[in-house]
Amino acid sequence: MFQITIFFLYLAAAILFALSRLPDWSDRARKLVIPAFLAAAIAVCTDGWLLYTALDDGRNITLANTVSIIGFQLGAIGLLGAAKPVLRGISAGLLLLAGMLALVTGKDPATAAATALSWQVRTHVLTSLFAYGLLTVGAIVAIAGLMQEWRLKARRLSPVNHLFAPLETTEALLYAVTAAGFTVLLLSVISGLTFVENLFAQHLVHKTTLSLLALAIFGILLAGRQFAGWRGRRGIYLYLAGFGLLCLGYFGSRVVLEEFLGRSWS
């Protein structure tokens, strides 16, 4: 029941923020933004409470709750990003996706193996999810940048373009998110190598390898931006490649281990 309510709150906020960016609604933007912020704030707070209850103090980190944690981050970041008018179109997308992910909170029960995770491993998992949440925001920003560039080159000029931030703003935001995500992901990898024992026995070698490859790609991207001034599609495609490896490493591992092998990574 709560999941449905949270979804509609996120949806309402997303629609209102999106409408506030359209020229036909510009004279009513202020009247739209106030209830949008209110709906988004209630949604994020309720989502956080429901997720905290479902996690059971970190002992119920199931696949569904893992997805919900990332959704909660998207909602919180979308709410904060909406404070800047030019980012409200992107924020609308983040809030909509957050609402969709909130629907699965608490949908699968905890397993005995999951409840046995030590606090060190739970810390590593939650740090990883924080990194994935940040980098998911970056992936959405990257896709928005590609769409905006395509629309401009195709001369598709319409009110929809107002939902996108200027390309310079989108690009700067992407690299800022990349830097933050890279830092947290590095901490996650270090904590994993420190706290997680018997990687071979737990079938986690491929996850670790893919995470290290993704970390290297994000590092190369940041170095290219800093020292070679990389811009445009090269950076976006490289980012999406790193994000794809990260998703394959983490969620691929969880699906195979939990859904097909009936195991946990504890």
Image: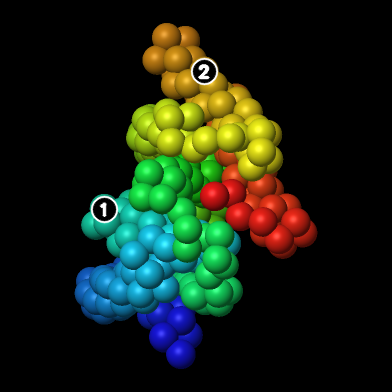
Residue in the picture at 48% in, 21% down: 219
Q: Is residue 17 visible?
A: no
Residue in the picture at 58% in, 74% down: 108
As drawn, which residue projects farthest toward the bottom? 1
Q: Is residue 120 visible?
A: yes
Q: Which residue is mark 2?
A: 220
Q: Which residue is mark 1?
A: 84
Tell me which amino acid carries mark 1.
Lys
Position of 60 with respect to 85 (left or right) is right
Q: Earlier in the sequence, mark 2 or mark 1?
A: 1
Whole-percent x, y for residue 145 in the image: 52, 42
As drawn, which residue projects farthest toward the top? 227
Q: Label 2's element?
A: helix
Tell me which amino acid carries mark 2.
Ile
Query: Contact, CB < 8 Å: mark 2 with mark 1?
Result: no
Whole-percent x, y for residue 222 in the image: 44, 21
> Hey, which quadrant is residue 2 in on the image?
bottom left
Whole-percent x, y for residue 154 in the image: 66, 43
Alpha carbon distance from label 2 to label 1: 29 Å
Residue in the picture at 42% in, 9% down: 227
